[in-house]
Amino acid sequence: MQISLRLDGDCVRAFHLTLLERLAALGDELSVDVRPAGSGIPRSAAALFQLETAIHGLPHDGLAHDGLAKRVPLSALAPYRQSPASPDLVIDLCGDVRLESTRVWHVTYDGASGEAALLASILAGRTPLARIEENGVAIAAGRLGTEYGGIALASFQDMLARTASLIVAAMSGAAKSVPDLPEPAQAGSPPPMPSAGKLGVRAGKALARRIVQKIYHLCYNAPHWKVGWRQTGGSDLFDLRAHPASGWQELPDDGSRFYADPFPILYQGQLTLFVEDYIHRLGKAIISAVPFGPAGPLGRPEPVLDLPYHLSYPFVFERDGEVWMVPESCANGTVDLYRATAFPGGWVKEATLLSGVVASDATLVEHGGAWWLFATVRDGGGAFSDALHLWSAPNFRGPWTPHPKNPVLIDIASARPAGRIVRRGNDLLRPVQDCRRSYGAALGIARISHLDLIGMEQVVETILNPGALWSGRKLHTLNEAGGFEFIDGSAIAPRWKQRTRD
């Protein structure tokens, strides 16, 4: 098939080269249409990006992350010939292709075309809905996200990267839709999406004003995460779909560290809570554990697994009479399986389940005669939280096979795991992170309606936000065991010199 990529020749970015390389890997014949389009971002955006680079310590050469926003010369497109007269498919990034004799895929953000539309959504604090449409019919869609809310440049690059993922997924028939979302159980939902249409003169002026405002408001507070716990009394959040009237008690910390990602396990009659233990002065986390009695924690979390790289999300489970853990180790590019030889410590690595992948919050579940591994993947750059991939295996030790439809979902509101998948009757209920406002901002409960080698479908039934019963700015993880339930989130804290949590 002959594919033509329509892009703005006045602003060629590394993103365009990355997209062309990924499309070329599919085996199709590629060409480019590089006529000036006039749909680029305002010149003032360069000043904003430079200021963010200086304040947030982003790499100057690549302009942060993988440098997808970096401008490259038009000559970089020399390996690709100019668009033929009648390509089989045109992928339109500019919104100005009006051919009747050729298939055209229009790429839009909140209904408008061009990178100015994407930046406008970012600066307005929205979660852009990217769509690929042919003759007004959606071919693929995804809610784009970032862990770097408040940093326009980093968000812009994350979402460019995921746009490439969405286009490539559309070529294989994946990522056709995103699930509808219920109203949040408490206040704090993101602003409404704008009506569809092209980004006109008025919207362009509004974007320029937002850029100027953003330049004057470049500041943020880093979150200090905390763990909340309570006795369920027989009714948990999967039943209540709201914060309990009794509220939550907090797992105390000494201020030099924070605790997050609580995973409890009842083993041999003892309830033990595993947490991510982030030490501010080290800028990385280890895994710690604390036993619980009938009235709460018995002491404070003590280290049980410390490696040279950042660890979090200690997914623990019992199988074959032993306790196993799959901690997040995306900083190492692996998903590893550990076994406890002296519970709650003595962890030894038994296997590497996945390698060469930046996978976040690996979550395992047994279903339909197979084991399934859920994780969000930083596919070709972009966010850590909006592209859900699946793997299947005959045994939790592996071997693990990637799902043929990966990514099975692109959605910043419901892709990333937020705790164990639980079974209620015939239903699989999956805690998910709603990162539309920011990373880990809200907690969703999704019912998995379909899971097999054909695909995965889910319905988000509840969204919980922080509020009077769980103060702070985030609500991020949900797990339970032994009659206790645990969540985590963050409060406003002094600005620590720490890296953003992955």
Image (spheres, helix red, strand yellow):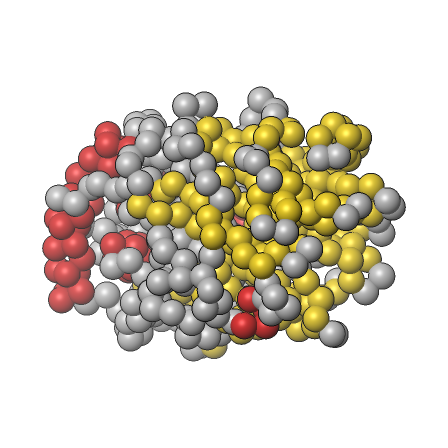
Name of the residue lying farthest toward the bottom: 136
Residue at 20% in and 35% down: 51
For the question of whether residue 236 can be seen, the reply is: yes
Taking the image as shown, residue 195 lies to the left or right of residue 373, namely: left
Residue shown at 55%/66% (left/top)? Answer: 237
Horizontal and vertical percent for residue 424? Answer: 70, 71
Q: Quadrant of residue 176?
A: bottom right
Q: Position of residue 178 (x, y in %)?
A: 51, 68
* Residue occupying image coordinates x 43% and y 43%: 225
Drawn side of residue 85 relative to residue 60, left or right = right
Q: Residue at x 41, y 58 (%)?
A: 470
Residue at the front extreme, as displayed: 295
Q: In front here: 258 or 434?
A: 258
The image position of residue 185, as x and y in percent, is 42, 71
Q: Quadrant of the N terminus?
A: bottom right
At which x and y percent is residue 465?
Answer: 41, 63
Residue 502 makes an appearance in the image? no
Would you identify the image quadrant in which residue 92 lies?
A: bottom left
Q: Looking at this view, is 466 or 74 the one in front?
A: 466
Above/below status of 4 relative to 354 = below
